[in-house]
């Protein structure tokens, strides 16, 4: 099988797997302690967690702290819900192309929610109007469906001017791009070759949150629940490797992008061709039956849209935000490639996808 769905998840790096195995000890091992226990085994596990925290923190700007969570969705919930007192009715502004973790959580806050429209390239211009009293702005770093990179430095300046916090979903850019300028940043390990089931929320120094999950008060009182040293260690190793390989990975992925553009030259690109992460290729052909295409290319793992919303039957809200019709959105596919993708994988996939599309008369 050929895997081209890197936006949904990435292969676990061997280095991350090795780091995890050390902390998955059985009864004959001394590496299975609870990191919140005061005895020696607990302190050993806690030390592993703190090493991992430092490795993950290196992906973020200086001047903040990392809170481990179960994933980016929990991190985003903590940021949106925890950054305001209960009953706060001040409005929040979110980009129209945010992940559902941001959009659905914002809509559940009980306050006015302003959606910031995208332009036809999938960029959220920083001159969009904000209502008075806006307490928080949410703009992602890299869009998960079309790969466009947002002007976060401009949005950070806009947030400061408005006296608002800036929340950035950096799931698709974490470990691949320089960290965004923001007050709260969400990250997920399995999108940068780490394990599933763990993520992080970075808080700029001075930003105060209230806990939204009560219990034992772990993670500085903000996120209760026993941490998994194995997951933390895997996340840390993946983060350290991403930082070390960032330049090499970027060059490899840009070469794959250039080859992919040649291989799919008669398809239409969705989103900007330049302001983007090059591991994401979202393309369309008029009248294409994507369900049939995927059925006929079963050995190629790609997406008809965001994996998080697959099966809903609804056109992509991201593609519609670009001005595409429902028909155009439903005739689009997303190919995602990265560190472990080979050029020959891409070429074989393109041969199969193009042949299946041409068989439909496309």
Image: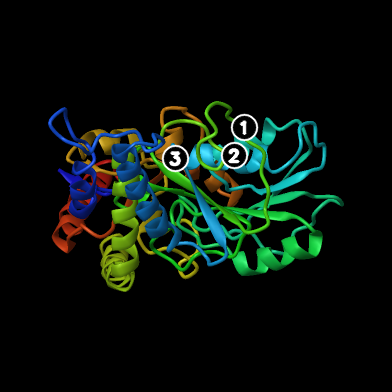
| Mark before the other along the chain sequence, 2 or 3 | 3
Cα separation between marks 1 and 2: 6 Å
Outermost right residue: 132
Secondary structure at numbered mark 2: helix
Question: Relative to 210, is 18 on the left or the right?
Answer: left
Q: Is residue 19 above or below residue 341?
A: above
Q: How many marks?
A: 3
**Residue hosting label 1:** 212
Q: Which residue is found at the position 46% from the left and 64% from the top? A: 276
Secondary structure at numbered mark 1: loop
Q: Which residue is found at the position 59% from the left and 65% from the top? A: 181
**Can residue 334 be seen in the rendering of this structure?**
no
Q: Is residue 246 above or below residue 358?
A: below
Q: Nearer the viewer, residue 213 or 43?
A: 43
**Residue hosting label 2:** 78
Q: Disc number at residue 71?
A: 3
Cα separation between marks 2 and 3: 11 Å
Q: Contact, CB < 8 Å: mark 1 with mark 2?
A: yes
Q: Nearer the viewer, residue 40 or 31?
A: 40
Secondary structure at numbered mark 3: loop
């Amino acid at each position: 099988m050929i895997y081209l769905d890197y936006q949904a998840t990435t292969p676990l790096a061997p280095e991350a797997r090795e780091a995890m195995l050390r902390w998955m000890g059985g009864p004959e091992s001394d590496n299975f302690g609870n990191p919140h226990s005061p005895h020696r085994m607990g302190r050993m596990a806690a030390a592993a967690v703190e090493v991992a925290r430092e490795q993950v923190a290196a992906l973020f700007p200086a001047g903040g702290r990392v809170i481990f969570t179960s994933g980016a969705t929990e991190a985003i919930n903590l940021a949106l819900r925890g950054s305001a007192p209960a009953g706060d009715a001040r409005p929040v502004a979110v980009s129209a192309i945010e992940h559902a973790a941001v959009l659905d959580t914002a809509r559940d806050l009980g306050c006015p929610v302003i959606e910031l429209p995208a332009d036809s390239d999938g960029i959220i211009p920083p001159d969009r109007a904000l209502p008075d009293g806006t307490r928080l702005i949410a703009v992602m770093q890299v869009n998960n469906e079309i790969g466009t990179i947002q002007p976060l430095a401009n949005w950070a300046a806009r947030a400061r001017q408005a006296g608002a916090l800036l929340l950035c979903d950096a799931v698709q850019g974490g470990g691949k791009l320089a960290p965004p300028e923001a007050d709260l940043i969400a990250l997920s390990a399995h999108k940068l070759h780490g394990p599933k089931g763990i993520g992080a929320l970075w808080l700029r120094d001075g930003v105060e949150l209230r806990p939204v999950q009560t219990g034992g008060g772990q993670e500085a009182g903000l996120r209760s629940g026993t941490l998994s040293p194995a997951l933390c260690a895997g996340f840390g190793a993946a983060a350290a490797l991403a930082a070390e390989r960032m330049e090499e990975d970027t060059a490899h992925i840009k070469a794959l992008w250039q080859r992919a553009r040649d291989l799919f030259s008669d398809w239409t690109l969705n989103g900007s061709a330049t302001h983007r992460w090059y591991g994401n290729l979202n393309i369309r052909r008029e009248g294409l039956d994507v369900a049939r295409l995927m059925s006929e290319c079963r050995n190629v793992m790609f997406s008809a849209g965001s994996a998080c919303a697959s099966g809903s039957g609804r056109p992509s809200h991201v593609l519609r935000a670009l001005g595409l019709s429902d028909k155009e959105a439903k005739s689009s596919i997303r190919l995602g490639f990265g560190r472990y993708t080979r050029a020959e994988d891409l070429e074989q996939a393109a041969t199969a996808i193009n042949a299946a599309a041409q068989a439909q008369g496309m």
